[in-house]
């Protein structure tokens, strides 16, 4: 699915990364250097990374030490599972009470299974909130819709649009910040 990303409308620093390890290093650096109140982590693209390539029966390690022969008809990518960055955010953070908002894309019509997946993420990562949406509720016209927000105890909100979701997350984070003062 092609997803449009919102461009920040306010003065902010945009930090780019090109690999899982770069993302991890930059999060570690910035969370350790500055005292953030919250982090909203949407990085499912970091679940796996390329480990090796295979062509003509030969395994090739990365980074490449030589150019791949352009005559190869088939190149197979072997992926490796990456560590879960979301589970490390609090340990990276200068603020050990940082609020973490995570995201969980599920792929089941079973509402109980969805909830179990969310609760597992909360337990393993220490997230304050998890936003869940399901692959089955996406259409080509509406690829980003129908979000449910959970905390460690229960479902706390449902949002239809990304705008509603951003408003709900903002409201939750402001309420938590006020409670901590």
Image (cartoon, helix red, strand yellow):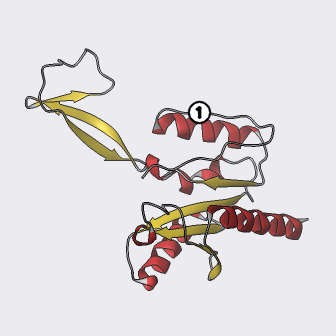
On screen, residue 158 versus residue 117, left or right, reads: right
> Which structural element holds mark 1?
loop
Which quarter of the rendered picture does the C terminus lie within?
bottom right
- The relative height of residue 17 versus residue 147 in the rendered view (above or below) is above
Residue lying farthest to the front in this orientation: 141
Instruction: Report the front residue among 10 and 178.
Output: 10
- For the point 76% across and 69% down, the residue is 172
* Residue 16 percent coordinates (x, y): 59, 33
- For label 1, the crowd category at 10 Å Cα-Cα, with few meaning under 14, some 14 to 19 and many 20 or more, is few
Instruction: Report the front residue among 163 and 174.
Output: 163
* Residue 7 percent coordinates (x, y): 67, 42
Residue lying farthest to the top in this orientation: 66
- For the point 53% across and 50% down, the residue is 85
- The relative height of residue 173 versus residue 118 in the rendered view (above or below) is above
* Residue 60 percent coordinates (x, y): 21, 27
- For the point 40% across and 83% down, the residue is 110
Numbered-mark total: 1
Asked which quadrant contains residue 55, the reply is: top left
To which residue does mark 1 refer? 16
Answer yes or no: is residue 83 visible: no
- The relative height of residue 132 versus residue 59 in the rendered view (above or below) is below
Answer yes or no: is residue 67 visible: yes
* Residue 41 percent coordinates (x, y): 60, 53
- For the point 83% across and 69% down, the residue is 175
Residue lying farthest to the right in this orientation: 181
- The relative height of residue 164 versus residue 75 in the rendered view (above or below) is below
């Amino acid at each position: 699915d092609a997803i449009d990303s919102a461009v920040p409308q306010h003065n902010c620093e945009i930090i780019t990364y090109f690999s899982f390890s770069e993302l991890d290093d930059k999060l570690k650096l910035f969370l350790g250097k500055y005292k953030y109140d919250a982090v909203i982590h949407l990085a499912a693209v970091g679940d796996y990374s390329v480990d090796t390539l295979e062509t003509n029966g030969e395994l090739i390690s990365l980074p490449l030490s030589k150019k791949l022969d352009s005559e190869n008809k088939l190149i197979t990518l072997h992926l490796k599972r990456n560590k879960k960055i979301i589970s490390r955010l609090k340990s990276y953070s200068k603020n050990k009470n940082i609020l973490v908002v995570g995201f969980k894309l599920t792929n089941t019509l079973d509402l109980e299974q969805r909830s179990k997946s969310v609760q597992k993420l909360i337990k393993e990562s220490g997230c304050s909130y998890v936003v869940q949406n399901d692959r089955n509720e996406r259409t080509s016209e509406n690829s980003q819709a129908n979000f449910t927000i959970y905390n460690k105890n229960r479902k706390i909100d449902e949002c239809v649009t990304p705008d509603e979701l951003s408003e709900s997350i903002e409201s939750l984070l402001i309420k938590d910040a006020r409670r901590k003062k």
